Image (cartoon, rainbow, N blue to C red):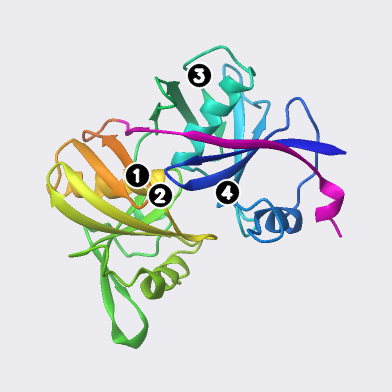
Amino acid sequence: MLLEFTKMHGLGNDFMVIDLISQRAYLDATIIRRLADRHFGIGFDQLLIVESPDLPNVDFKYRIFNADGSEVEQCGNGVRCFARFVHDRQLTNKTKFKVQTKAGIVEPELGQNGWVRVNMGYPKFLPAEIPFAADEPEVLYDLELAEDQQLKIDVVNMGNPHAVTVVPDVLTADVAKIGPQVESHTRFPERVNAGFMQIIDENNVRLRVFERGVGETLACGTGACAAAVSGMRRGLLSSKVKVELAGGSLFIEWREGDVVWMTGPTATVYEGRLDLRYFQG
């Protein structure tokens, strides 16, 4: 059976997107890992799957799988590409709709030239909501790393867990060494995305993110939300921030007690068809 798919990206954070409303397929973790391989498969950071919703008054269900085959709750760049995909494929004629995710309902709104604005919901900060092992809530936590190193982090859940640390310069931050230690730290029972943020001024930051199950990516939408919110609630940033990532920039808005808004571009790379038999067994 030939399976139709679309390759997309949001600021270089790339996705394979599959419509499983109008076609059928079974994709287990082994198949997903093979599809994600950049030498022998399609190659992507995440696989995005479009399904019919389980809930009333919702337009679509959206599932996200990392390159290692693990399913995750949310993906900020992914939801923008998802919104563009369902509209371009004429699965809806709406420009604003509701999407069911493992993390709850998100509401993307299509703009001009491939840009999408998304209501990302309310950020969560309590340790149990991350989840993160801590005796009581703090503004910052000390995280013990290898070689007796300590890292000061803030923890934010934006539909998936993030640990945010402020660094003097993202270009010199040792993301390759520190990122994996944070991602798999025992205090994060479901692992975590590790964000490294450099504050330029109150309206501009630079960010690198080591994503759980993927590694460092060119951009991370929920990571941008988490980093911006972390700086905002600590009084380091204004309520509207430009987050510069390796693949481009996102714009994040948030006020205490309100939802987080994320705005950014999307791009379709190509469309194709594949025979799943080559990725089985």
Residue 97's label in the rendered image is 3
Closer to the chain start, of discs 3 and 4, is: 4
* Three-letter residue code for mark 3: Phe
The residue sitting at 28% across, 81% down in the picture is: 149
Query: Mark 2, residues whose alpha carbon is within 10 Å: few (<14), some, or many (≥20)?
Result: many
Pointer 1: what residue?
Answer: 248
Point out residue 157 in the picture as x, y percentages from the top left corner: 39, 48
Q: Is residue 174 above or below residue 84?
A: below
Secondary structure of residue under mark 4: strand
Residue occupying the point 58% across, 22% down: 88
**Front of the two marks 1 and 2:** 1
Going by the numbered disc 2, the residue's amino acid type is Ala
Give the image location of residue 118, x and y in percent: 40, 29
- The magenta stretch is 259-281
Badge number at residue 219:
2
The residue nearer to you, when weighing 49 against 56, is 49
Give the camera-side residue of 188 and 215. Answer: 215
Image location (x, y in percent) of residue 65:
61, 49
User: Along the polypeptide, which appears first: circle 1 or circle 2?
Assistant: 2
CA gap, disc 1 to disc 2? 7 Å
Assess whether mark 3 and mark 2 are in contact (beta carbons under 8 angstroms).
no
Disc on res. 46:
4
- In primary-sequence order, the first of circles 1 and 3 is 3
